[in-house]
Image (cartoon, coloured by chain):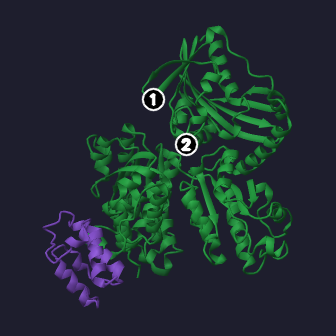
Amino acid sequence: MPELNSQPKAEITDAASAIAVLDAVAAQPTLVRINQAGRQIDALADLLGRVPLRLACLSSFTMDPLKASIELHGLRAGFRFETYVAPYGRFEQELIDPSSGLNAGGPQAVLLAVRLPDVCPALYDSFNGISPREAGDILGEWFTRLGTALRTFRERSSAPVLMQNYEMPLSPALGIADAGGPHSQASTLRDANARLQQLSRDIPNLYVMDYDGLVARVDRERWCDPRTRLFARIPVASGHYWRLAGFYVSHLRPLFGLSKKVLVLDADNTLWGGVIGDVGLNGIQLGQDFPGNAFVEFQKRVLDLHQRGVILAIASKNEPGSVEQVLAEHPQMVLRARHFASTKVSWNPKPPALREIADELNLGIDSFVFMDDSPVECDLMRKSLPEVLTVQLPADPAGYSASIDALDCFEQWTISEEDRKRGELYQAETGRRQLQAVVVDMPAFYRQLEMAMTLYVNHLPHVGRASQMTNRTNQFNMHTVRCTEDDIRRFMTDDQHWVVTVALADRFGDNGVIGMAVVDRGVETWRVPLFLMSCRILGRTVEQSFLRWIAEKAREAGGRRLEAEFVPTAKNRPFSGFFEQCGLRRARDSGDIQLWEANLAAGVEPIPDWIRVAVE
Amino acid sequence: MTNSDKFKSIIAAILQVDEDTVTDQLTPDRVDTWDSLNHINLIGALEQEFGITLATENLERTQSIPVLKSLLAQHGVVV
């Protein structure tokens, strides 16, 4: 039985206390705690909600009870949702009718929570009474309805629509024969889910969330409560509201730049058992038997995260050199020095170490996750840097790998080649900085880098990476407009625009695609409606060279003026001053928008000779 | 916390009212937050906090504070 919070109103004075309120709900997400926090949602939103979003929830069941949980989870991720919940079962009308609440509200994202048992009940409760052909007809009719509604909506709005897939039944219609039969209920529902995936490929900006996987992971037998399902069309048991809301929000984060990027790990009793300074290299627990195997398993899960693009770092209180020795020499280590973009080993407090890592990597501290076994370190981190997501490991190392699996903050909708290589890229960055430390003047440093820049115009294989960069890049970004893959593809294929992607290689390795711009090719005036670059490349004259290349192309085509806008946001300060460095003039301001322009007739400054340029 | 205090704080949290307004005189007609949906939340919260399971018929809103108390009493919870 949960302990009831005897102090229903915790004092919310700063971000740390606001996060403490949300963490208390997450620790025991009872209806009472969700409601108590929900009552303070405005105060929480003022401190934590940095990305406002009009979110519409459409469903085949009563979704209202989930609203508070969705909004609270959203705040933990950085969203400030303005939530519209449509009456249950009205999703088709809402999508189709131009004057519906959905369409009138101008949603920026739509959750489409349709349960197949609600729309095709025969497939669930009386499957054995229908023939395979009838089952096919039922699904065919449903997908026609769904496709029509979604296409109609898509003509009106480009907001991403996130659909949940269809759950397997609690008890298979054919009993034990269902798993192997050719026309079984399971195979029919798998077919339905395959068709849903197909629909998401046919209609732009449509995403499928693996709801069936969630139900199976959590507890299929207790996921639904038949009492609230039958009485009020609330199928999901109230004990699972929090989990389901978190599931929805984790799918929204990567679409709006709110996924985390860096995992900072403690070393002693996190990467291995024991304290290296006390027991030495051969005394730490790491190997084939418990508890050593729990740490090996944990490291493997961390490595797997790293190989889908999560940047790793270490913050350890130890004698400098000791952690590095384990990374280099211990035979059972899975993670090695090359996997960590930064390793901070000292007796200094950890919050400043995380700040240093953020500066080195040129990434916002709010994209960091910190994991440590020590409650003291975790508490200090939560209080000093509330924008970091702090995760305390459980007392028993057998539970360590589950702590990695429970993280839902690193999500990305597509994993690109750059993601797989990101660790190497940041590792190479450390080498570049060391080089910078020994050379005297900057041109000499740039020359030693041996940079080769390759520009691609309307290169379709880069669609995914280009869209991803608009969603992930917050700092060196002229106005942080997010683009879906479909938006990019449209720019690439019309006659008016160029999508220019830029890749960079240097003597330390291939950085992959690190920047992109959209160019609107006018007659006299060329405009640059989108310009961004990965922060890890900044300060090497690549950003200026990229813009100069565009300006030169405009001049060659007879353009007389180049125009671009800068819209300052909370995070894109690194961009301010950039246009001025490139010789553009601030023509005028309208509201938050600064319009900058360059006169091309006066010529364009050449790209420095230390960058080799190729066009694909 | 006594069962009685706990009962009050649950009702207060779900109906978004102050704890001292939770008396036998509080009825669904008198608080606009005690609607049919919140009543279902209320039953769910009582179940979660007291570790009991109530029958589906109790999800009907035709109830009052004394009725909820006697419902809990039937499940061995005296408030």
Q: Position of residue A452 (x, y in %)?
A: 78, 31
Q: Residue furthest top?
A: A601
Tell me which chain the residue with mark 1 is part of.
A
Q: Is residue B3 above or below residue A304?
A: below
Element type where label 1 sits in the image: loop
What's the residue type where badge 1 is placed?
Answer: Asp
Residue A391 position by quadrant: bottom right
- Which residue in the protein does label 2 denote? A471
Number of other residues with Cα within 10 Å of mark 2, as a class: few under 14, some 14 to 19, many 20 or more: many
* Distance (Cα) linking label 1 and label 2: 21 Å
Letter of the chain shown purple in the rendering: B
Q: Position of residue B19 (x, y in %)?
A: 25, 71
| For the residues bearing labels 1 and 2, Cβ distance under 8 angstroms | no
Residue at x 45%, y 69% (from the top left corner):
A168
Q: Earlier in the sequence, mark 1 or mark 2?
A: 2
- Which residue in the protein does label 1 denote? A592
Mark in the foreground, 1 or 2: 1
- Res. A166 visible in picture: no
What's the residue type where badge 2 is placed?
Answer: Asn
Q: Is residue A460 above or below residue A176?
A: above
Letter of the chain shown green in the rendering: A
